[in-house]
Amino acid sequence: MAKPVLDLTKFTFTAEQVRDIKELVFEAALTAPEIDFIHAIHTGIEYDKEIGFVFGGGLVGKAKQGCDPVAHDFAINTRKVTWKPKAWEIIIDECADNLKDTAALYCKNNGIRMDDLTDTDYIAIVVMVLEEAIKNMIYRMIWFGDVDAANVGDGDGIITEGVDVDYFNLFDGFFKQLQTAITQGAVSVEIAANNGATFAEQEITPEQAYKLLNDMYYKAPLEMRTPQNGQKPSMSFKVTQSIADAYEQYLSDAKNHEVMYKNLTEGIDALMIHNVPIIPMPIWDVMIAQYNNLGNRLYKPHRAVLCETGNLAVGIVSEEGFAELDAFYDKMSRKNRIEAKDQMDAELLNFKRLVYAQ
């Protein structure tokens, strides 16, 4: 008998045990922020569909000419980013026979529908957990995706040994694109702690975290730091929790306590620097630890991006948003199937309007 999707074999099966699987207590788990909180979501994208940009022109204004004046050279700059969505799918099967002698037996249907679990609390719980797993999947793809993904030990591979690289090679995510951006002149800042030879040597200090964020701010293009049309800049820091924690410790230090107190009493997010919000991304830390473990150290455990939300574009083909789950029962195979599928892409729109620290 195959192992059920929801493993209830750990419970002793007695009439007094779990009679309703809705009684199960869900342990608190780290959840990823909503996708549209730090990304610009584009729905209904098509393959090779372009996003066009206009960003200013050349010089104008010369001394007045006499008769038959010559027109000045003037051209408006344009560039484009092209969507290349890739298809993904999730397929999960469950056979009711796998639930024999488990607490889930109480939630099964009877009679002719005894093999159909689609309207049971069992499938409802599986779907609820799966929905959170999909959100984490999206973060894994759009940030850690790499079409050349390889395991540690395979050349320059950085994916933890034993982790299936097929979960990473659908398309290049933002971290891979940020590396490319640096090679094309994007502003970068080195995080010295990332170069440590051991886990312990990769710890980042409060002072290093403050200096890092301060350096990133002052290296940001002036266009990002300057108010546009009377609106304050929309940029923000997206940082690993390790950097956020270290910076918070820096602010909590006695000599910097006044800054923290001022932010809190004025209703300002305590994690800010130069009035720019700092958004901790603990989901990065978890995934780096799980998927970028080199053995005795992590691959770039501390990362930070300073950019505008609109620069992190996530495209999906569905007009309705990320795909919904479809649960159904197949009479021929007597299996209950849960499926989800869609097409997705992630595009860093402007290499010149960001600062990446790694």
Image: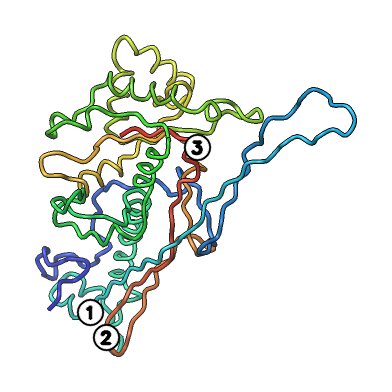
Inspect the image, locate mark 3, and give the three-letter code of the amino acid beneath it.
Glu
Across and down, in percent, residue 186 comes to 43, 35
* In front of the other: 328 or 180: 180
- Disc marking residue 300: none
Mark 3 / mark 1, whichever is N-terminal? 1
Across and down, in percent, residue 148 comes to 28, 56
Q: Secondary structure at mark 3?
A: strand
Mark 1 / mark 2, whichever is N-terminal? 1
Seen at 15% across and 44% down, the residue is 294
Compute the Cα span from label 3 to label 2. 50 Å
Disc 3, disc 2: CB below 8 Å? no
Q: Secondary structure at mark 2?
A: loop
Mark 3 / mark 2, whichever is N-terminal? 3
Foreground: disc 1 or disc 2? 2
Circle 1 Cα neighbour tier, 10 Å, few/some/many (<14 / 14–19 / ≥20): some
Task: Relative to 236, say whether 310 is above or below.
Answer: below
Inspect the image, locate mark 2, and give the three-letter code of the amino acid beneath it.
Arg
Taking 307 as reference, is 104 left or right? left
- Disc marking residue 308: 3
Q: Secondary structure at mark 1?
A: helix
Residue lying at the far right in this picture: please name it.
67
Inspect the image, locate mark 1, and give the three-letter code of the amino acid beneath it.
Ala
Which quadrant is home to the N terminus?
bottom left
Residue indicated by mark 1 = 96
Disc 1, disc 2: CB below 8 Å? yes
* In front of the other: 84 or 127: 84
Residue indicated by mark 2 = 334
Q: Quadrant of residue 120?
A: bottom left
Seen at 30% across and 34% down, the residue is 358
Taking 338 as reference, is 58 left or right? right
Circle 3 Cα neighbour tier, 10 Å, few/some/many (<14 / 14–19 / ≥20): some
